[in-house]
Image: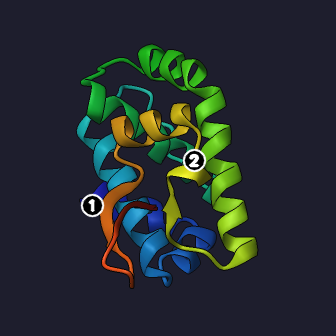
Amino acid sequence: RETALAHLKSSAKLMRMCFVPALCYIICICLEYLLSKCLSKLELPETVTQFYVRMLKIFISKHQNLSSVQSEEMQLDKHKLAIFGLCDLAFKGLKDKKIVFYVGDISEQVKEFASMSGLMLVFDVKKIDSGQETGYAF
């Protein structure tokens, strides 16, 4: 805990990021995971991008019970197209101000990866005409 606080205090950029609850949550999860691994040569992320990439690796490794950094890198490379698909979907969602996506919005590869990694929620959306459709959200 002290190491995580020291790392945060040593970087004004990280401290500013912690004012945004979602970013603070990502930073805390990453630091907890990295510090619990007790890596001998610990290189902690320092930028938002580094934390996002690290968070993605953590989600993949936690859901697939991976232990080594090399395995994380191989999984990241293996799912590169699905990750790009998720990035594209997130960008389209921001551009179109859309937070719920439907089956037609997401390719099968992206749906499979998102459910495997826990990066998207899957839920039922009730329609006005009393129909029901599957919805996805980050």
Residue 28: x %, y % from top left: 35, 61
Residue sitting at x 50%, y 81%: 20
- Pick whichever, 15 or 116, lies toward us: 116
Q: Do we see residue 136 in this rendering?
A: yes
Q: Answer with left or right where residue 107 lies relative to residue 36.
A: right
The image quarter in which residue 3 lies: bottom left
**What residue is pinned by disc 2?**
106
Residue 110: x %, y % from top left: 54, 38
Q: Answer with left or right where residue 21 lies relative to residue 49.
A: left
Residue 111 sits above or below residue 127 on the image: above
Residue sitting at x 24%, y 24%: 65
Q: First in sequence: mark 2 or mark 1? A: 1
- Number of the label disc, if any, that sits on residue 109: none
Q: Nearer the viewer, mark 2 or mark 1?
A: 2
Residue 88: x %, y % from top left: 71, 51
- Pick whichever, 21 or 83, lies toward us: 83
**What residue is pinned by disc 1?**
2
Residue 121 sits above or below residue 35 on the image: below
The amino acid type, in three-letter code, at marker 2 is Ile
- Identify the element where label 1 is drawn: helix
Residue 86: x %, y % from top left: 60, 47
Dot 2 and dot 1 residues touching (CB under 8 Å) = no
Residue sitting at x 28%, y 34%: 62
